[in-house]
């Protein structure tokens, strides 16, 4: 049925475990994004992990409570912000002579601040992918069908 | 000698399972599953092409010199392709759910008339 | 590389189960098995970036597909195959395998890639970009246009989903 996708949330066990672990999942996503230029990961994987932590909250605590905090318009706006950030980093490359040129100094290899604009691009990609997929998830899960029965 | 192409053959067998599901099944969700399987097979094929015997992951390690590495270029392309695949799958599911709401079924032989 | 062949055989079995299983929810879970096997194969083939991405993307894909199977009470029905389409599908699948096997003769053998372009990336990425992860250096520096195209496709897909799943416009149309 259309109404069984967790309007009131799941059981107490699921809620408690979610409350304990969701912060760790979010933190892991942030770590993956910020270390994307040194170790496996990057903006794509980290963005999906951050989106998954929000999906976990949404599924465990039910749609009604989550929608009080998260608005769908805010999520789609955040996705556009990510796209604009990525394009802005690309345009800032003109400071170095061309579109997508690496305009920042490279820094020392293997240190956290290195790679020029790559960490910034990772953050932009992370915002874009995470917000986009979470927006898709919200649209699909909260779909109840348009009320056409009384036509 | 046969060993050199066996992974590719297994990969295309996986792809053909997806093709069979797309062409032969009636249920719309099952067709989407077939598309997803075919997409996995293509990603796997690209990664199989870039594996090098004795190679390491393409990440520089501090202190190591002359590392033999696998080909990083297909990995970079597949990384974007996976996320695009998820987005298109979500789009297909959205269209399928809308069709289900209109027609009350996932049966593609009964989704015939163009209305609405 | 015997574990690679075992995992690929497992994936083919999982894919066949996903196609032929009667219960739609079980079919979706079988596709999840295929995706997780794919993630382990990526790890075996020294592609940790993609293994991580595939793992998390698979979870989201299974969530979305399960949402589609739960949409209404009769959606789990087994609808079977089209007899003609099934025959045609088997034919095309066999044709795909045959063309593939013919085409593989011209490919480099497994384990010996050509690496004409990427040799340069491997040698120069540390001095060009300063990033230790060469895959990140490629997707965000050497080939950032590709990532920009990916971002465009993702944006289009999100806009498409939000448009298809909208509630307001359809209601007005239906009430007319």
Image (spheres, coloured by chain):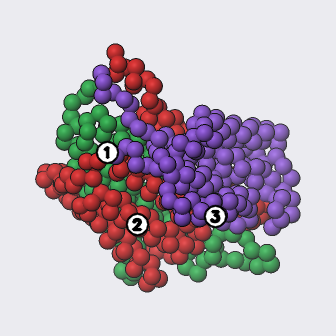
For residue C8, which quarter of the picture? bottom left
Total of numbered circles in the picture? 3
- Picture colour for chain B: green
- Foreground of the two, C91 or C67: C67
According to the picture, the residue beneath numbered tag 2 turns out to be: C34
Q: Earlier in the sequence, mark 2 or mark 1?
A: 2
> Which label is found at residue C72?
1
Nearest to the observer: residue B92 or residue B84: B92
| 1 and 3 marks in contact (CB < 8 Å) | no
Looking at the rendered structure, the secondary structure element under dot 2 is: helix
Please give left or right for residue A90 compared with residue B10 in the image: right
Give coordinates of residue B11: x percent, y percent: 38, 67
Quadrant for the C terminus of chain A in the image: top left
Residue displayed at 67% across by 41% down: A82
Q: Looking at the rendering, which quadrant does residue C167 occupy?
A: top left
Dot 3, how many residues are within 10 Å of its Cα: few (below 14), some (14-19), or many (20+)?
few
The hue used for chain C is: red
Of all residues, the one furthest to the left in this rendering is: C83
C12 with respect to C80 (left or right): right
Q: Which residue is mark 3?
A: A21
Q: In the rendered structure, the residue with mark 1 lies on which chain? A: C
């Amino acid at each position: 049925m259309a109404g069984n996708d967790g309007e009131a949330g799941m059981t107490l066990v699921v809620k408690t475990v979610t409350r304990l672990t969701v912060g760790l999942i979010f933190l892991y996503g942030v770590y993956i994004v910020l270390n994307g230029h040194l170790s496996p990961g990057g903006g794509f994987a980290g963005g999906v992990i951050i989106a998954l932590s929000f999906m976990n909250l949404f599924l465990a605590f039910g749609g009604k409570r989550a929608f009080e905090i998260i608005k769908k318009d805010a999520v789609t706006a955040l996705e556009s912000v990510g796209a604009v950030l990525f394009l802005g980093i690309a345009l800032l490359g003109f400071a170095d002579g061309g579109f997508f040129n690496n305009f920042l100094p490279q820094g020392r290899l293997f240190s956290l601040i290195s790679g020029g604009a790559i960490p910034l691009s990772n953050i932009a990609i992370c915002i874009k992918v995470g917000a986009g997929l979470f927006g898709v998830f919200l649209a699909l899960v909260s779909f109840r069908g348009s009320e056409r029965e009384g036509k | 000698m046969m060993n050199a192409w066996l992974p590719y053959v297994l990969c295309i067998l996986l792809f053909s399972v997806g093709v069979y599901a797309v062409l032969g099944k009636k249920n719309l969700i099952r067709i989407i599953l077939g598309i997803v399987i075919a997409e996995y097979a293509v990603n796997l094929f690209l990664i199989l092409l870039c594996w090098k015997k004795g190679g390491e992951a393409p990440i520089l390690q501090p202190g190591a010199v002359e590392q033999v590495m696998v080909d990083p270029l297909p990995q970079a392309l597949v990384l974007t392709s996976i996320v695009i695949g998820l987005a298109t799958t979500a789009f297909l599911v959205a269209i399928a759910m809308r069709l289900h709401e209109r027609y009350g079924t996932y049966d593609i032989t009964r989704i015939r008339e163009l209305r609405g | 590389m015997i574990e690679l062949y075992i995992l690929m055989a497992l994936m083919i079995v999982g894919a066949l189960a996903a196609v032929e299983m009667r219960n739609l929810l079980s079919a979706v879970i079988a596709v999840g098995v295929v995706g997780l096997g794919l993630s382990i194969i990526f790890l075996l083939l020294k592609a940790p970036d993609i293994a991580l991405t595939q793992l998390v993307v698979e979870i989201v894909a299974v969530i979305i597909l399960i949402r589609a199977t739960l949409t209404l009470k009769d959606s789990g029905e087994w609808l079977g195959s089209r007899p003609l389409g099934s025959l045609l599908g088997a034919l095309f699948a066999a044709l795909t395998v045959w063309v593939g096997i013919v085409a593989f003769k011209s490919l480099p053998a497994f384990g010996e890639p050509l690496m004409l372009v990427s040799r340069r990336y491997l040698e120069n990425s540390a001095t060009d970009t300063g990033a230790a992860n060469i895959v990140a250096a490629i997707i965000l520096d050497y080939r950032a246009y590709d990532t920009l195209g990916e971002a465009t496709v993702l944006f289009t897909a999100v806009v498409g989903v939000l448009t298809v799943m909208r509630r307001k416009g359809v209601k007005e149309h239906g009430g007319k």
